[in-house]
Amino acid sequence: QVQLVESGGGLVQPGGSLRLSCAASGFTFSGHRMSWYRQAPGKERDLVATVYGDGGTYVTDSVRGRFIISRDDAKNTVYLQMNEVRPADTAMYYCIAGGYPGSWGRGTQVTVSS
């Protein structure tokens, strides 16, 4: 079955950087759309970024210019490079495979604080 394992979260100071990873298995990763979502306490889970099978990307307005999504098909892994982080970026971050609703991993916590 589809399995997604997020990692790389932690405590980071405002203005710092962090790289999240999501290791995928159980489906054909190459050419598959992958997305990162985040959920802050008491809020809905929101889309952060998507990378398409052809390598094209989309990032939401609030992180555009700061976050970069990428993929390595040889490693079945999708990444989220987070730069210039802000306290508002504090959330649990999840990845999901397009076409597999409910295939959420356990997430990785990102806390931005001085």
Image (spheres, helix red, strand yellow):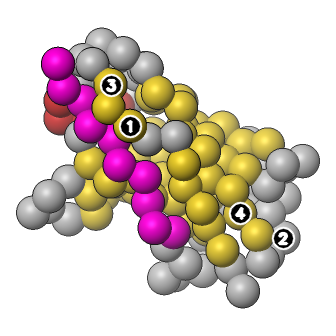
Q: Name the residue that disc number 4 marks.
A: 24
Outermost top residue: 15
Residue 104 visible in the shown view: yes
The crowding category of the residue bearing disc 1, from other C-alpha atoms within 10 Å (few below 14, some 14 to 19, many at least 20), is some
> 109 or 96, which lies in front?
109
> 18 or 73, which lies in front?
18
Side (left or right) of 77 relative to 66: right
Q: Tell me which numbered mark, 2 or 1, is placed earlier along the sequence.
A: 1
Label 1 sits on a secondary structure element that is strand
**Disc 3 versus disc 2: nearer the observer:** 3
Q: CA distance from mark 2 to mark 1?
A: 29 Å
The crowding category of the residue bearing disc 2, from other C-alpha atoms within 10 Å (few below 14, some 14 to 19, many at least 20), is few
Callout count:
4
Could you say which disc has been placed on residue 28 in the image?
2
Q: Position of residue 39 (x, y in %)?
A: 27, 57
What's the residue at 9%, 63% (across, down)? 42
> 46 or 55, which lies in front?
46
Label 2 sits on a secondary structure element that is loop
